[in-house]
Image (cartoon, rainbow, N blue to C red):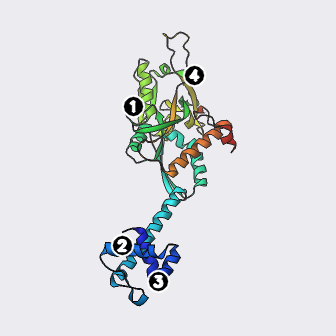
């Protein structure tokens, strides 16, 4: 049984005439009659009574009529729904992002996307990079803004988009820190740290950097999310290593850039600011939806414009390749 045959059947049932039905469909009458006969053979029953040219439905035809009507209506609904999804009139995007991005750049990019595609439902999951990678791998997210590098065996494709400087967040009135424009990891030795919960990449990066510098970090409190960590620093529980973007709107805190250690065995080595790379990730083995592809395009355009107008937050740099001039002017 084919959809075309059901369509021919409905046309004949409504017109009660083979030639008029063929004219309505724009097909040759012999072709229509042949398809009706094939359908009757498939079903094992005649659908029309053809006595003296008077076309009426048989009991089998009466039974098929509502079913065929519903089947073709469902096909039309499916076609319309897919066209709406393809045309970005409806759908959803499940996006994961780190708290530093949720509280800064991401909000503006989401607003732009929502204005362009108001029918797309946005679901945002905030969490540490490791948690987001796990959720993305399980298929619980469509896209995620994660921190590189990822494990070699990850099934994710990544596009680096931003570099965030890392800072030591301290109370604005904390005078115990060295009076230098940059701090080193070793300046955190024996200093109480406010530490993120398990799952935050910055937790592992901070602990690893401390151990590579020859000491074990000391925690005043650990286990918080981003807002909690910053609040703990504000009340004087300790200092924290955070991305530069989260310090905006925190007048009670100041950020001191965190530098890497010199490498003595490398001639001419110098200190460089510590940073992390943010990438947009998706599953390699899952086809991208139109809605998620449109979000990536919107985000990249937003970041290009922010970089061109120098409106990226302090300590943040775009890693996207420059747009071709003709594309940018289009």
- Name the residue carrying label 2: 38
Q: Earlier in the sequence, mark 1 or mark 4?
A: 1
Under tag 4, what secondary structure? loop
Report x, y in % for residue 96. 47, 44
User: What residue is at 43 percent from the left and 71 percent from the top?
Assistant: 72
The reply to whether the C-beta atoms of the residues labelled 3 and 1 are less than 8 Å apart is: no
Q: Earlier in the sequence, mark 4 or mark 2?
A: 2
Task: In this rendered view, identify the residue nearer to me: 177 or 104.
Answer: 104
Quadrant for residue 313, please give it: top right
In this view, the mark in front (1 or 4): 1
Q: What distance separates the C-alpha of mark 4 from that of mark 3?
A: 88 Å
Q: Is residue 241 above or below residue 139?
A: above
The reply to whether the C-beta atoms of the residues labelled 1 and 2 are less than 8 Å apart is: no
Q: What distance separates the C-alpha of mark 3 from that of mark 1?
A: 67 Å
Report x, y in % for residue 78. 45, 64
Task: In this rendered view, identify the residue nearer to me: 15 or 184.
Answer: 15
- Name the residue carrying label 4: 182
Q: Earlier in the sequence, mark 3 or mark 1?
A: 3
Q: What distance separates the C-alpha of mark 1 from that of mark 4?
A: 33 Å
The N terminus sits in image quarter: bottom left
What's the mark number on residue 152?
A: 1
Under tag 3, what secondary structure? loop
């Amino acid at each position: 049984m084919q959809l075309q045959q059901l369509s021919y059947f409905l046309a004949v049932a409504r017109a009660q005439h083979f030639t008029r039905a063929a004219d309505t469909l724009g097909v040759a009458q012999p072709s229509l009659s042949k398809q009706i006969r094939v359908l009757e053979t498939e079903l094992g029953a005649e659908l029309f009574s053809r006595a003296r040219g008077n076309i009426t439905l048989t009991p089998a035809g009466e039974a098929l009529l509502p079913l065929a009507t519903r089947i073709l209506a469902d096909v039309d609904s499916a076609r319309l729904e897919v066209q709406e999804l393809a045309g970005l009139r409806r759908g959803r995007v499940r996006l994961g992002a780190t708290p530093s991005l949720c509280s800064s750049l991401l909000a503006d990019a989401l607003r732009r996307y929502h204005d362009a595609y108001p029918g797309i439902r946005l679901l945002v999951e905030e969490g540490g990079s490791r948690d987001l990678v796990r959720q993305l791998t399980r298929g619980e997210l469509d896209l995620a803004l994660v921190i590189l590098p990822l494990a070699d065996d990850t099934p994710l494709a990544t596009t680096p988009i931003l570099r965030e400087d890392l800072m030591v967040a301290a109370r604005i009135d904390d005078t115990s820190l060295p009076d230098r424009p940059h701090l080193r990891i070793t300046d955190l030795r024996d200093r109480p740290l406010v530490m993120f919960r398990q799952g935050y990449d910055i937790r592992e990066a901070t602990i690893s950097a401390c151990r590579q510098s020859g000491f074990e970090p000391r925690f005043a409190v650990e286990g918080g999310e981003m807002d909690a960590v910053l609040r703990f620093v504000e009340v004087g529980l300790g200092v924290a290593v955070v991305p530069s973007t989260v310090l905006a709107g925190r007048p009670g805190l100041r950020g001191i850039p965190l530098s890497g250690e010199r490498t003595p065995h490398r001639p001419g080595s110098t200190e460089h600011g510590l940073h992390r790379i943010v990438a947009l990730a998706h599953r390699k083995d899952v086809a991208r939806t139109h809605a998620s592809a449109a979000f990536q395009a919107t985000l990249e355009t937003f970041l290009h414009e922010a970089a061109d107008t120098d409106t990226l937050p302090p300590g943040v740099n775009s890693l996207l390749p420059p747009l071709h001039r003709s594309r940018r002017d289009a």
